[in-house]
Image (spheres, rainbow, N blue to C red):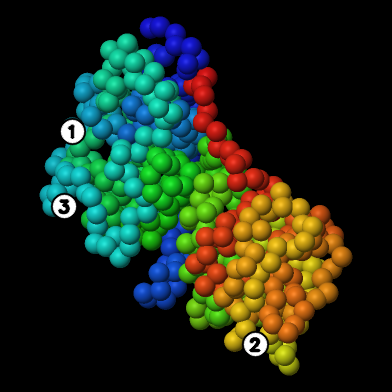
Amino acid sequence: MRRNAVFGLTLCGTLLAGSFGVADNPAPKSLTLHQRLRVEIKSGSGRYRTVRRTVTWKPQQTAIVVCDMWDLHHCLNATRRGREMASRMNRVLAAARRQGMLIIHAPSGCVDAYKGHPARLRALDAPRAKNLPKKIGSWCYRIPAEEQGLYPIDQTDGGEDDDPDEHRQWAATLKSMGRNPRHPWKKQTSALTIDEDRDVISDNGEEIWSVMEQRNITNVILLGVHANMCVLGRPFGLRQMAKNGKHVVLMRDMTDTMYNPRRAPYVSHFTGTDLIVEHIEKYVCPTITSVDFLGGRPFRFRNDRRPHLVIVSAEQEYQTEQTLPKFALKHLGKAFRVSYVFADEADRNNLPEINILNHADLVLISVRRRLLPKTQLDVIRRFVMSGKPVIGLRTASHAFAPSRGKQPAAGQAMWVEFDHEVLGGNYHNHYGNQFRPVITAASGVEQTLLPTAANLSGFHAGGSLYRVQPLSKSTTVLLTGRIEGHPPEPVAWTNITRWGGRVFYTSLGHPDDFKSTAFNRFLANAVYWAAGLHRTTPVAKANRSLK
């Protein structure tokens, strides 16, 4: 073995080794899982609501399949991320064994390294199942449910996200070790313990299915790499398990993707993983996290430093449930983790997923006159009063205010003062819809704050001009709008709340506004500013060593 200065350690052909003790406690009789899936709000709408449900499984009827956690990978960054994830994964496996679950290690193409191993013999000794599904031994590229949507990332280049120079050095290092730089794996990482007395080793779909049938396994948890390739498609992967009747879930914080941010949709590697998880939750199966086994918080890669932005869309006038997801994917996907909250289709005054704000870093509100249950509005109040950033779009100025003459029903609450207390605004109606205001950058504004504000000068807004004068003294106006014969009105400004939170608001946001490159850049810069970032700020630098 030789030391390579680029990677800062002696490469021994394996990743970090680890072992964890197993307590002699009796196995629990049930396993509680908190599943997440996506359900279309209305058939054909293309909008999905996140649904969480709690299920109870019998541990003795549950298997965990560890997919392709190899010792080395041709992609250096994939090797790094696998090493980082392996320690917690091993703790998950140890906890699962204590509960009586079967662990199946499936390092594809490497089972010959385990010839004679008791866990390998256990797979070979299982009687061939009489109910082997058709093509269970083959790769599965798609199931019928996936025809409803578009695959979210371009992985046609193989998904390597290495720095080109590092990748060349990594390939040379692998070659010097006697490894094939394209297929360097020889066994599963030694960071994962294989219990000789209980576990199973196989990469064969028919063998794994037969083992499951022998053990009366009806529930399957997949973890490992890579979610968009092997975890989905292998003969023992999510698609095969789902289409053949197993209750299958993905452990979403114990996986990774092969995705190169230089390919569509040109988002960060971690956003690419989020998009694949979302695809799985829509069309293949629910997901869980390792918290169900270990408690605490879900695992997160150290280089995933994206602020968590929650977009709340609950208005029927300006189609932001369509424009904002497209905007966010294109303009925020490199730097932000983005989640969505949409109104309940059956109850416009219900935001079922608003509790996600409890774990968010900033919020974008596009809401119009919703009288929420008090518990839901309290979530928003607590978020604002914690001093976290708020971005308000158009009708956010009257987001939680009732229509004239309307009062909250029992259990509902309103926040009429949200406009003044949070946004720093003073909305009191608008000019006629037939007028399209001309936008001008406010004189004397600090253009380094939002550098594209000037680019909107001369822009004709798609929607009516809001009457908002006078604003709070704590605001800084960035853009004004004017219609002939009337004084100008502010259409974009910043504010600092009395709780110390950064706020950006604009009364722009009509669907036609999103057709403008300048407006999209302006709004994106505003989100970056609210988060304390600049468009050039690197939020996830590559980890440069394997130490």
How packed is label 2: few (under 14 Cα within 10 Å), some, or many (20 or more)? few
Q: Quadrant of residue 458?
A: bottom right
Q: Quadrant of residue 47?
A: bottom left
Q: CA distance from mark 2 to mark 3?
A: 64 Å
Residue that numbered label 2 is attached to = 432
Amino acid type, label 3 = Pro
The reply, left or right, for residue 467 in relation to residue 271 is right
**Residue for point 50% across, 34% down:** 88
Amino acid type, label 2 = Gly
Residue that numbered label 3 is attached to = 133
Amino acid type, label 1 = Asp
Q: Residue furthest top?
A: 2
The image position of residue 375, as x and y in percent, is 69, 70
The reply, left or right, for residue 57 in relation to residue 318 is left
Whether residue 253 can be seen here: no
Q: Quadrant of residue 285?
A: bottom left
Q: CA distance from mark 3 to mark 1?
A: 19 Å
Label whose residue precedes the other's in the sequence (2 or 3): 3
Whether residue 78 can be seen here: yes
**Residue for point 63% across, 55% down:** 452
The image position of residue 259, as x and y in percent, is 39, 41
Q: Is residue 509 above or below residue 22?
A: below
Depth check, front residue: 141 or 219: 141
| Local secondary structure at mark 2 | loop
Of the two numbered discs 2 and 3 in the rendering, the one whose residue sits closer to the viewer? 2
Label whose residue precedes the other's in the sequence (2 or 1): 1
Q: CA distance from mark 2 to mark 1?
A: 78 Å
Residue that numbered label 1 is attached to = 125
Check contact, mark 2 vs mark 1: CB within 8 A.
Answer: no
| Local secondary structure at mark 3 | loop
The image position of residue 174, as x and y in percent, is 33, 17
Check contact, mark 2 vs mark 3: CB within 8 A.
Answer: no
